[in-house]
Amino acid sequence: ETEVADYMKSMAIRVSGFDVPRPIKSFADCGFPVQLMNAIAKQGYEKPTTIQCQALPIVLSGRDIIGIAKTGSGKTAAFVLPMIFHIMDQPELEKDEGPIGVVCAPTRELAHQIYLEAKKFAKPYNLRVAAVYGGVSKFDQFKELKAGCEIVIATPGRLIDLLKMKALKMFRATYLVLDEADRMFDLGFEPQIRSIVGQIRPDRQTLLFSATMPYKVERLAREILTDPIRVTVGQVGS
Ligand code: ADP
Ligand code: MG
């Protein structure tokens, strides 16, 4: 165990929560199927980044997570890779009943970046990824959602609009990601986030990522996550 402790110290990883899985050192330690390993290699990702080393085993074990690490640390793959794994693990995947993975991000630029990353890893499995954000035709997005998807990447406001229009059903959603939670709060999306969370079954797995952890975000995390493990990488202010 001292070996693990030394390793985590060298990586500047701090964790809190119970029964924390030990960090991995390579993608091969994740138990990913060969198609996903190939997609990772194709991306040029040789080894997991620090946040990925600790977040991947936690998320893959089904636990809720609060991941705090600065921009550029590789948080997207830390939630996208286990999301693909989670979806492929679902029974009766062919039944088209709305997204299984739901990702909320503060801006359309960010949602689009996550969409591109998710597409790359979803491709070998032919999973459908829908991007839903403002500034583009709501009608086109309505049609895309109606056609079915396994993953939706959304800004909160547009997702609420489309839920009101009954473009999608949330009862199959079991994997919820709130990315850049601090920025979503700064942009005033707290009510929309709460509404979305309230429409997703409580036995979901919930992941919250943020560069900083102000009190308001902390309070929401405490309400909507179940026994989360908190992972902090590096020096983070609040
Ligand atoms: P964050 O969300 O923490 O700001 P991103 O997920 O956007 O960070 O990743 C930042 C950059 O690092 C992206 O260009 C991404 O493709 C790249 N990246 C992510 N994981 C790895 C990895 N394991 N190896 C190499 N590059 C990676
Ligand atoms: Mg990010």
Image: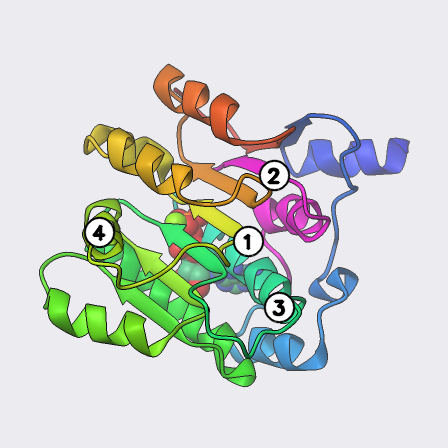
Magenta region: 46-70
Badge nearest the viewer, 2 or 3: 2
SS at mark 1 in the image? helix
Q: Tell me if the residue at label 1 has its CB under 8 Å from ligand 1.
A: yes
Badge nearest the viewer, 1 or 4: 4
Question: Which amino acid type corresponds to the residue marked 1 in the rendered image?
Answer: Ala
CB-based contact (under 8 Å), mark 1 and mark 4: no
Q: Distance between the residues labelled 2 and 1?
A: 13 Å
Which quarter of the rendered picture does the N terminus lie within?
Answer: top right
Q: Position of residue 42 (x, y in %)?
A: 54, 80
Q: In this view, does 54 lie above or below 150?
A: above
Q: Position of residue 180 (x, y in %)?
A: 36, 40
Q: How far apart are marks 2 and 4 (CA)?
A: 28 Å
Is 121 situated left or right of 113 in this image? Answer: right
Q: Is residue 57 magenta?
A: yes
- Of callouts 2 and 1, the N-terminal one: 2
- Of callouts 4 and 3, the N-terminal one: 3
- Crowd band around label 4 with a 10 angstrom C-alpha radius: few (<14), some (14–19), many (20+): few
* Residue 136 figure quarter: bottom left
Q: Tell me if the residue at label 3 has its CB under 8 Å from ligand 1.
A: yes
Q: Name the residue under label 1.
A: 78
Q: Distance between the residues labelled 4 and 3?
A: 42 Å
SS at mark 3 in the image? loop
Q: Distance between the residues labelled 2 and 3?
A: 26 Å
Q: Residue 164 carries which label?
A: 4
Q: Mark 2 points at which residue?
A: 64
- Of callouts 1 and 4, the N-terminal one: 1
What colour scheme does the image use? rainbow
Residue 83 visible? The answer is yes
Residue at 9% across / 60% down in the picture? 135
Q: Where is residue 57 in the image (x, y as percent from the top left)?
A: 71, 49
Residue at 66% across / 49% down in the picture? 53
